[in-house]
Image (spheres, rainbow, N blue to C red):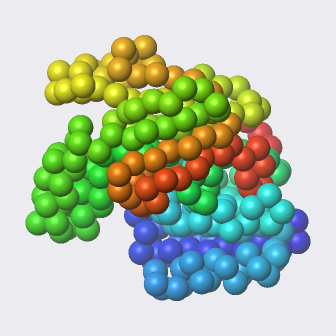
Amino acid sequence: MKRIDVVANIASGSVGPDAPEIAERLLAEYGVTGVVHAPAPSELIDCLRVVIDGTPDAVLVLAGDGTARAAAEMAGADGPLIAPLPGGTMNMLPYALYGERRWEEVMRDCLGDGEARMISGGEVGGRLFFVAAILGSPALWATAREAAREGRLDLALARARRAFRRAFSGRLRYALDGRPKGKAEALTFLCPLVSSALDAEEQALEAAALDPKGAVEVFRLGMNAALGQWREDPSVSVGRCRSGRIWANGRIPAILDGEPTRLPPETAIHFRPEAFRALVPAKP
């Protein structure tokens, strides 16, 4: 690779103000031509678009979950390689690709012995995800978490109350892969990158419909999840999914790769076998 650009959000979780200097030093150490960009948070997405449109060989993204997902979505299967370095709080996509490691270690391995790997994913409501999507009232708790992380405890409490009120009141309807229609409190879709029930090359998403009927079943589901046995819980229906339709009475709260969002009241989901090309270390 002749040119690698780095886009760093120094305001993100575990990045820090010295990250651009460290990234420049690593590029020089490995003899790679490139530019390190450190835009203001409000200019981050525009900067990513300009960098990706400039068609470097690879773009290393040092930021949070939303930015990592956005970069991979912008690049797609035909764009430059994307390396989402762990720079956020949850780091869902970086940890799925590289394990729980510091961004400097991952960057060294990618520069020293990197290779391309095609990553599959899912698309829901026209937006891509590469790790997991959660649809339904449980996704409302993510907005409360975000407010608490920003120090807005009053807003976090208000959102937590709204999430509690919505529980068991806004069930989803769905039809997946032509199977009979169903209802659920929440739907989750896991990509082959992280699903323990799918082979890495499997051409489908793992779909789970969660439909606990009350507080007791919610508690049981939580305990089973803590033990790694959520698939065996009676309130969970699990299967494969390549395409489907989901609808509700209002806009559907969702989390895509750790990023809270809202989807239209009726939305489609599809498996994408070639979503983007990741830069990963050749060594296991």
The answer to whether residue 244 is above or below residue 278 is above
The answer to whether residue 243 is above or below residue 279 is above
Along the line of sight, the residue nearer the viewer: 230 or 266? 266
- x, y percent for residue 191: 61, 38
Is residue 61 rendered to the left or right of residue 138? right
Q: Quadrant of residue 39?
A: bottom right
Q: Residue at x 50, y 44 (%)?
A: 246
Along the line of sight, the residue nearer the viewer: 13 or 46? 46
Q: Residue at x 35, y 56 (%)?
A: 250
Residue lying farthest to the right in this orientation? 2
Q: Quadrant of residue 35?
A: bottom right
The answer to whether residue 211 is above or below residue 150 is above
Q: Quadrant of the C terminus?
A: top right
Is residue 15 rendered to the left or right of residue 110? left
- x, y percent for residue 120: 71, 45
Is residue 8 among what the camera can see? yes
- x, y percent for residue 66: 50, 63
Mark count: 0
The answer to whether residue 97 is above or below residue 45 is above
Is residue 150 rendered to the left or right of residue 15? left
- x, y percent for residue 172: 39, 41
Is residue 253 among what the camera can see? no
Q: Residue at x 40, y 32 (%)?
A: 183
Q: Quadrant of the N terminus?
A: bottom right
